[in-house]
Every structure is written in structure tokens, then in C-alpha cells.
Image (spheres, rainbow, N blue to C red):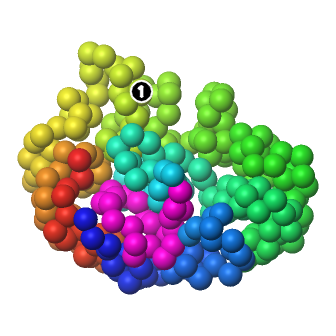
Amino acid sequence: MKPRPITAAYAPVLEMLQLPAFCGRLMRGEVTSIQSPELWEFGPLNVWECPFPPALVPIGYRESAFNSLYGSWLHWFGPRRQTWVKAFEDYRTELIEIGRSFEQFAIYHAIHYAECEGDDDALLVFLRECEFDEALLAETAKWFDVCGDGFERYAEHPAFKNDPALECVSEDVTKYRGDFPHPGMSAAQLWNCSGIEVSDELRASFPDQKGLPPWLQDYPREDIDRLFDDYLGQGKLWESWLCLNCGGWEGNAAVRAIRQLAERAGDPKFDVLASAWAEVHQDNDGLR
């Protein structure tokens, strides 16, 4: 595998999505508040070598024993809302929702960075660079004094309490109000989920696969490209998109597919995303 031109390719995507300016600086490795890269290494993204699904808009990575990619998780043509995730290098085994909003995403990183630094002031510097208002910044500092980097302890924080990220309530998912795949979802709800974001454990809770959408049956399907073509031929953009965010794609087949989906959709904003993802994933080994 070789490094991918993520930073240049995805700059128009961040602009199109109007993501906070901090996201662009993080993607380029220009976050000045991070003073100890040996403890908390972020970007620039061009060193990332592994493929990633089209729904993931990458803005940073952390180099560690388990390299991880961070960014916005954004579905197109369907009812799901934007969220924020952490994806390990082997995204097939774990994709974690760490924010239902940019504020939650920023707090997740700030508390872990400050804990690594062993410096409470690092939290304030980091969140100021994220352009937090002073009231939310002061409130977060109070919580950090009590909770440290125990993310699950922030569920009642003002930025989380009405819509906490799944990782924040992973010990009691009954408190989760979002739509990211989680334990207890019904087969009907999984018709709005792609294969990559559905854990092996959640799929295993349907041993007979009854009621599951075709793209989650016998996962990963060897004929996912054919299933995509069938849905696209019927004009079912949402189902086509969900198929595209599944394992089972070989070589450049997914690049061909996202270009076909963009042409069929006729959405200028999606064109920006599709062009960026295709540029980064030319000549890859596929999404497996």
C-alpha cells in the first residue's frame, strides 16, 4: 500500500460540508495546541495507507499501537444524520461513534489529550482552538476535574445529555437515542445501516438472518457489486449507497460504483465527495 493524497482531495469536501475550521487544521496537521506529538500524534492524513468507506470523511488520525482514523460519518440519500466516529486501521472489526455533534467529538479528544499531557490547561487550550464559547469551555473544565478522561462519565454533560454519543453510554445503551448501529436494534432498523458500521456481534444476534437487508446477509457478500447494480438500476439511491459502504468490494469496483452513483444522483454536493473518495482510492485493494 502507498500513502494516499487525502489532504488535498478532501479539502473541497470539508468546505462543501462547512465543517468547523478546526477540522481543516487537524487534517493538515496544523493544530497548534498539540504540543507533544510523541504522546498524541495527529495527521497530516497523507501518511494513511488503508482504504476507508465513502461514508467516512477523514479529518485526523492518531498513530499508536492501534492506528485510528477520526472523522465525520455522513450518509447520503437517506434518513441518517451526520455523526462523528473513530475507525481502527482494520475498520471491519470496530467503528465507534464518539460524537453526535462536533462539540462532543472535540471534548472526546480534548479530555484524552489533556490526560496524556497530565496538564489541565491543555484541555482549555485545545477547546479554545476548537472555538468553544467560554461558558461551555468552563463547564467542560469542571467536568474534567472530576471525571478525567472517563468518557462514559460525561453522559450528563450539557453537550451530551440530550443526545449522547454511543461510546459515551456504551455501558448502558438504553440511554442511547441515536441511530448509529447498536445492541438491541431490530432487523427493520438495520435496513438503514451499512455493513461496515454493523458489528459482528450485532449481526450475530440474528442467527437466521431473518428480516435483515440483503447487504447484511452472508456478510461480506461476494456479489455486493451486483447487488449495488440492481439497486442503482431501480433508482434506489439509499440502498445503493448502503451497499457501497459494505465489505466485499474488490479492486477498483467501488470506485466505478461511486462514480455511477454520483452520475445517477445528479447532486453537485455528492459529486464533490465522490470525486474525492475516487481520487484517494484509485488502484486500491478494495473494501473487504
> Number of labelled discs?
1
**Does 25 sit above or below residue 133?**
below
Residue beneath the point at 66% across and 36% down:
169
In the picture, measured across the screen, residue 9 lies left or right of residue 98, that is left
Residue 162 locus on image (x, y percent) = 72, 45
- Badge 1 marks a residue whose secondary structure is helix
- Front-most of residues 80 and 69: 69
Front residue of this view, candidates 26 and 230: 26
* Label 1 crowd bin: few (<14), some (14–19), many (20+), radius 10 Å: few
When asked about the image quadrant of residue 133, the answer is bottom right
Q: What residue sits right under mark 1 in the picture? A: 201
The amino acid beneath tag 1 is Glu
The image position of residue 187, as x and y in percent, is 36, 26
**Residue 81 appears in view:** no
Image check: 123 left or right of 59?
Answer: right
Q: Is residue 234 left or right of residue 86?
A: left
Q: Position of residue 220 (x, y in %)?
A: 22, 38
At x 46%, y 38%, the residue is: 181
Magenta region includes residue 50: yes
Q: Residue furthest top?
A: 208
Residue 238's x, y, as percent? 29, 51
Q: Quadrant of the N terminus?
A: bottom left
- Depth check: give the residue in front, 237 or 108: 108
Compared to residue 83, the image places residue 57 above or below, namely below
Residue at 15% x, 44% y: name it: 224
- Image quadrant in which you'd find residue 286: bottom left
The residue under the point 50% across, 33% down is 182
Residue 139 visible in this rendered orientation of the protein: yes
The magenta segment is: 43-64
Q: Is residue 278 magenta?
A: no
